[in-house]
Image (tube, rainbow, N blue to C red):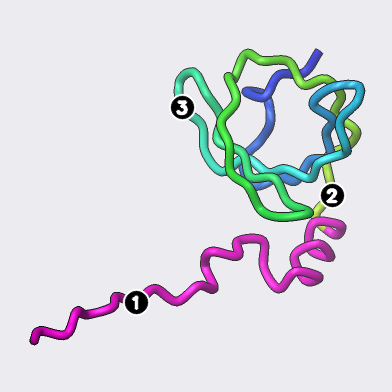
Amino acid sequence: MLTYGELKQGAYYLIQTDAESDIELVTVLMGTRETVLLRSYLPSTEDFFRFGAEAIYKLIEELDAETAGKFESLYGQADPEAEEELFEYEDDEE
């Protein structure tokens, strides 16, 4: 059985985390010695850690480059935080 630690960075995967779960589209953002940081898409973007040795219930498929490109073009880009503008509010001194 495939584990989260075996997933490649930069690739997109369709997975199920258990028999009752919905299909998720995930990508690996980074890995540590013991964990993997994943990003899940749809219905909203969520980042979460999994133990690298933890088994994936079901790997449905790894998206090929063409399909991954179509996904990215549908959503503008795969990283919605990159579009956000960060700004600070300044308190008015009275």
Q: First in sequence, mark 3 or 2: give its number.
A: 3
Numbered disc 2: secondary structure: loop
- Asked if the residue under mark 3 is in contact with the one under mark 1, i.e. CB atoms within 8 Å, the reply is no
Give the labeled residue for mark 1: 87
Q: Start and end of the magenta stretch?
A: 66-94
46 vs 9, nearest the viewer: 46
The answer to if 26 sits in the magenta stretch is no
Give the labeled residue for mark 2: 64
Q: First in sequence, mark 1 or 3: give its number.
A: 3
Q: x and y percent of residue 93 in the render?
A: 10, 84
Give the labeled residue for mark 3: 32
Q: Is residue 76 left or right of residue 92?
A: right
For the image, the number of numbered tags is 3
Q: x and y percent of residue 40 in the render?
A: 70, 45
Crowd rating for badge 1 (residues with CA inside 10 Å; few <14, some 14–19, many 20+): few
Inter-mark Cα distance, 2 to 1: 37 Å
On screen, residue 16 above or below 45: above
**What residue is at 46 percent from the left and 27 percent from the top?**
32
The answer to if 88 sits in the magenta stretch is yes
Q: Is residue 31 left or right of residue 19?
A: left
**What residue is at 71 percent from the left and 55 percent from the top?**
44
